[in-house]
Image (spheres, helix red, strand yellow):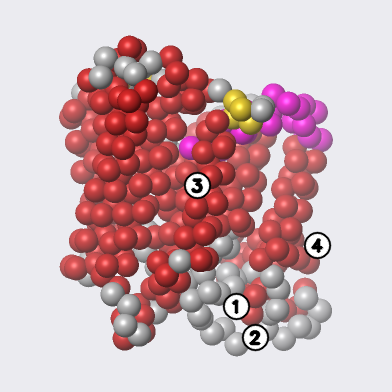
Amino acid sequence: MKQVVSALLGRPGSQKRAGGSGVGEALSLIGVLLVLVLLLEGLTGRFVSQATFTSIAFQLPELGLLTLAMLIPIISGGLNLAITFSANIAGLVFAWVLQWGGGPAAGPEIFVLGVLAALLTGALIGGSMGLVIAYTGAHPILVSLAMMIFLRGLGEFLTRGGDVSGFPPYVVQLGQGSVLGIPIPLLIFILCVAIWAVVLRRTRLGFSTYMLGSNIEATRYSGVDTRRMVTLIYTLSGVMCAVAGIVMLTRFNSVRIGHGESYLLITVLACFLGRVDPFGGFGRVLPVVIALVILQVIGSGLNLLGTNQHLATALWGGILILVMVLRYVWGELALGSFLRAGRTPAPATKGPNQ
């Protein structure tokens, strides 16, 4: 029980400093997940069913992909508030290519061309933000907020606020079909999770991302081209947004500017619950994914309980504030040390792989 509470409330990185492991952290979050499932089953009497888990499996990927797009900028000490509208614009470019290639009669080669165009669009959007942040020194919140407003206005101007639809049948099949009982969007999400984990843990870019989040000046003096790295980080974030936009198009068989707008807060919440340091320098992919599942389970449970959608949105914000307050209490008042039966916390040094 102490591990479960520590996993949710302990300061990011504190478990490793205290000798814990990422596996223990993940197991603690899985414990939270199991408790939630049992609680919701007790409240609704029909939560543990194939229909519920199938619904979660189809809904999780688009939110998960946007969370991955948010994850790397946060670890680097930044933020990307434009993730949803980057996904919308990339999806819109994908839709235009499909319509240019024949609409419902577009062939697989047009589909591939559309995917490449969408990925390039996401990379350009993310790269543009990265360049501005890296070379002007502007705060990532301001730059991504400005980009979000720009993309929203541009998208609504181009679409007149309407939907874009009319795609080949196989596109819908990709978004709503399954392979061996596993939804195709979920397979895409699992692949992206694996790629992100490798990038963060096994590549120079990943190591530099942690270093940037820990201390950007020290990173610069160590010989890392921080401007290039920041640009790459936001470019990758934009590419992941494009993947999310493609998945959303195949799921809903249409594109609309503003779709998934409510996901922005949840992606930040998922990173926070997954013990990503909001100031950068620490974060792992696996705990964030488990936190995503926890949030999706809560969302499905609220739907089964008939909770109003606006109230559910308010609850997400309330949960985020509550976790921040509890973490403050846990860290600053040494409540965690008390519950861990007097274990002395290690010095709060910050390193690139914390």
Give the side of residue 178 with respect to residue 102, left or right.
Answer: right
Q: Which of marks 4 and 3 is nearer the N terminus?
A: 4
Cα separation between marks 4 and 3? 32 Å
Q: Where is residue 143 in the image (x, y as percent from the top left)?
A: 25, 57
165 drawn magenta: no
x 67%, y 34%: residue: 301
Q: Give 38 or 182, whichever is nearer the viewer.
A: 182
Q: Earlier in the sequence, mark 3 or mark 1?
A: 3
Q: Is label 4 or label 3 in front?
A: 3
Q: Toward which corner of the image does residue 298 lie, by quadrant?
A: top right
Residue labelled with disc 4 = 1
Q: Which of marks 3 and 2 is nearer the N terminus?
A: 3
Residue 273 visible in this rendered orientation of the protein: no
Which quarter shows the C terminus?
bottom right
**Which residues lie in the magenta part?**
41-62
Cα separation between marks 3 and 2? 34 Å
Q: Circle 4 — which element?
A: loop
Give the side of residue 251 with respect to residue 9, left or right.
Answer: left
**203, above or below 333, in the image:** above
Residue labelled with disc 1 = 332
Residue labelled with disc 3 = 192
Label 3 close to label 2 by CB (< 8 Å): no
**Amino acid, disc 1:** Glu
Q: Circle 1 — which element?
A: helix
x 37%, y 23%: residue: 108
Residue 38 visible in this rendered orientation of the protein: yes
Q: How crowded is mark 1: few (under 14 residues within 10 Å), some or many (20 or more)?
A: few
The disc placed on residue 346 is 2
Q: Position of residue 90 (x, y in %)?
A: 30, 37
Which quarter shows the N terminus?
bottom right
